Amino acid sequence: MSSVKMFKTDYPGVFYILGKRTGHGRKEKIYYIVYRRKGRLINEKAGKQYEDDMTPARAAGMRARRIEGKELSNAERRRVEQEKKDLWNIARLWKEYVKTKHTSKSLSTDKSRFEKYLKGILGNKEPHKIALLDIDRLQRRNLKDKSPQTVKHVLALLLRIVHFGMYRGICKPLPFSITMPKVSNLKTEDLTQAQLKALIKALNETPDIMTANIMRMAMYTGMRRGELFRLCWQDVDFQRGFITIRDPKGGKDEKIPLNSMARGVLKKHPRQPGQDLVFYRKDGKPFTEITRQARRITKAAGIPQDFRPLHGLRHHYASALASSGEVDLYVLQRLLTHKSPIMTQRYSHLRDQALRKASDLAGELFKEVEDKADQVEIAEGGET
């Protein structure tokens, strides 16, 4: 600054130099303030005349606040900002976590959960400085109207972020254990015959072909939402009658039969040249969520609001097969691409009911035969 001429103002400790205005040929004043802080002489920039709308009076006010300690100096403010950047808080850990999960199927869902629920309350906190009260506040403020399943997903995401940092040695653990809400995973969703007819009518009447056909495929094949969103034409083998499910939830690729109803849906489904995705948004990109569109259809059909459109149709598919009594649980497991039979066991009671019904029918048939035999024996005895 010694080689640049500084001009005094009418305010003590406020000076300016003349510099070029960015993007203009004209010059503008750049104001500086000089003051002592804790015995140390500080000379720092206050702001530019036009770009920062700085005036000598405003610069003088800034100088007074900094002398009184009500405002940090430029150097102190830069140091605080750098310290914030150096802190491995939840927001910074999340950014690094995302970089390692760029191929994760659940990343878009995790991003939504982080932005909606975690960022505002816990984003600026380091894991070891999070208190139980912060978790309580999170649940009261952001998750109070959410289902136990949603709360569990959000808390699990928080734990994954923290464990990510701990594994790399860049953060300390939470100072407490988080108790997860209890969630029943045994919920099955069935539609009555009347509801099913109403839904099919609504699907036939909606102009939203993409959503309607996604729902039809969920109903006719039991495929998961993500599997339908990723389905490509190259995965549909019309000749052999199979659908290849790429990278399913269970792990390795799976094949499921292409039944006549699903075949009919796909044969009539519009195909765009150069587009390999079966189902896609208007911009040509894959779907990540269709809840809003699907709920419009279920609402038109009079389906209860708590019915989950795609999950519910998958469950209805499984329930219908299990209750038919003609499909054993191993086959059902293969059709649903469950990695473990444990998940398929939720439908065992439906198969048990079908078996019991069949057994009762057999009993009635034999009883009918025995009754007829008794009647013949009585009749013959009477003639004797």
Image (spheres, rainbow, N blue to C red):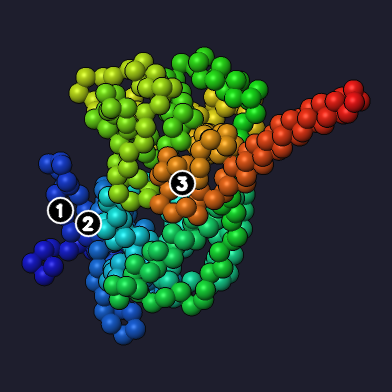
Cβ–Cβ below 8 Å for labels 1 and 2?
yes
327 in relation to 59, above or below: above
State which quarter of the image contains the N terminus.
bottom left
Q: Position of residue 261 (x, y in %)?
A: 43, 22
Q: Nearer the viewer, residue 197 or 138?
A: 197
Q: Which residue is mark 3?
A: 330
**Identity of the residue drawn at 51% across and 76% down:** 176
Q: Which residue is mark 2?
A: 30
Q: Position of residue 65 (x, y in %)?
A: 41, 69
Helix or strand or loop: what does disc 1 sit on?
Answer: strand
How many other residues sit within 10 Å of disc 3, few (<14), some (14-19) or many (≥20)? Answer: few
**Identity of the residue drawn at 24% across and 71% down:** 43
How many other residues sit within 10 Å of disc 1, few (<14), some (14-19) or many (≥20)? Answer: some
Q: Which residue is mark 1?
A: 19
CA gap, disc 1 and disc 2: 7 Å
Q: How many marks?
A: 3
Helix or strand or loop: what does disc 3 sit on?
Answer: helix
Q: Position of residue 256 (x, y in %)?
A: 36, 36
